[in-house]
Amino acid sequence: MVEWIIEDGLTEYDHAVALMEARAAEIASGTAPELVWLVEHPPLYTGGTSSDVADLRDPDRFPVYATKRGGQYTYHGPGQRVVYVMLDVGKRGRDVRCFVQDLERWVIATLGEFGLTGHIRDGRVGVWIDRPDKPRLPDGRPAEDKIAAIGIRLRKWVSFHGISINVEPELEHFDGIVPCGITQYGVTSLVDLGMPVTMDDVDVALRRSFDTIFGPDRA
């Protein structure tokens, strides 16, 4: 069984990392069940293992944390659902690429609960939404905005860190970084797209779609 915890209020980032690392060690040793932990953070930036300091446009705006997850700079803050996944990838096929693809499929299935179609793009980590209401890019490609970020780390084949979905964050807070090192595209949220949804709605959708991707028959 996978345990689910929905954290009230705002969770400090250092506390989240400490809890994830401790829980991942317990899962690896067989002394604790897998965990999906849903949190919100106060405004902050995190830089993954591929971060380029040049992408940190405003380092004094919010606290900046160096983290050992994959990926580049991202923003976390109120109105964004951060989903930390501590799952035993060793028992789920030992295929890191497949696991990341399953996380992407989970986000897409969750967005589908609200009638939205998420996309995966080669060379661009995360989940993207077409924006036909926006002007095309200078090279003629359709406009797209990022709605979810993904970054994980494995230790002894147990994952931690995870995904973040923009529900109703302050989108201007992303201006302090180059999100995931990509400059040509914007960032959006469910509310920005006109979806009258709450964090509780998103949590229900996450839970409902989880078993489809990660349920017992997939372990």
Image (cartoon, grey):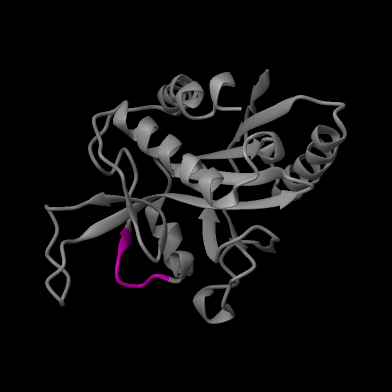
Q: Quadrant of residue 93?
A: top right
Compare residues 30 and 86 and report the one nearer the observer: 30
Q: Is residue 117 above or below residue 51?
A: above
Q: Residue drawn 52% across and 46% down?
A: 98
On screen, residue 52 above or below 63: below
Q: Residue at x 15, y 77 (%)?
A: 139
What percent of the width, then of the height, locates residue 109? 37, 32
**Residue 59: x, y in percent?**
59, 72
Report x, y in % for residue 102: 48, 40
Image x and y of residue 11, in percent:
67, 39
Residue at the spot 75% in from the left edge and 47% down from the top edge: 17
The answer to whether residue 167 is seen in the rendering is no
Q: Is residue 184 one of those drawn in magenta?
A: yes
Q: Is residue 99 left or right of residue 14?
A: left
Question: Which secondary structure class fits the magenta region best?
Answer: loop
Q: How many marks?
A: 0
- Looking at the rendering, the stretch of residues picked out in magenta corresponds to 182-186
Quadrant showing the N terminus = top right
Quadrant position of residue 35 = top right
Residue occupying the far front of the picture: 93
14 horizontally vs 116: left or right? right
The one nearer the camera, 217 or 143, is 217
Question: Any magenta on residue 38?
Answer: no
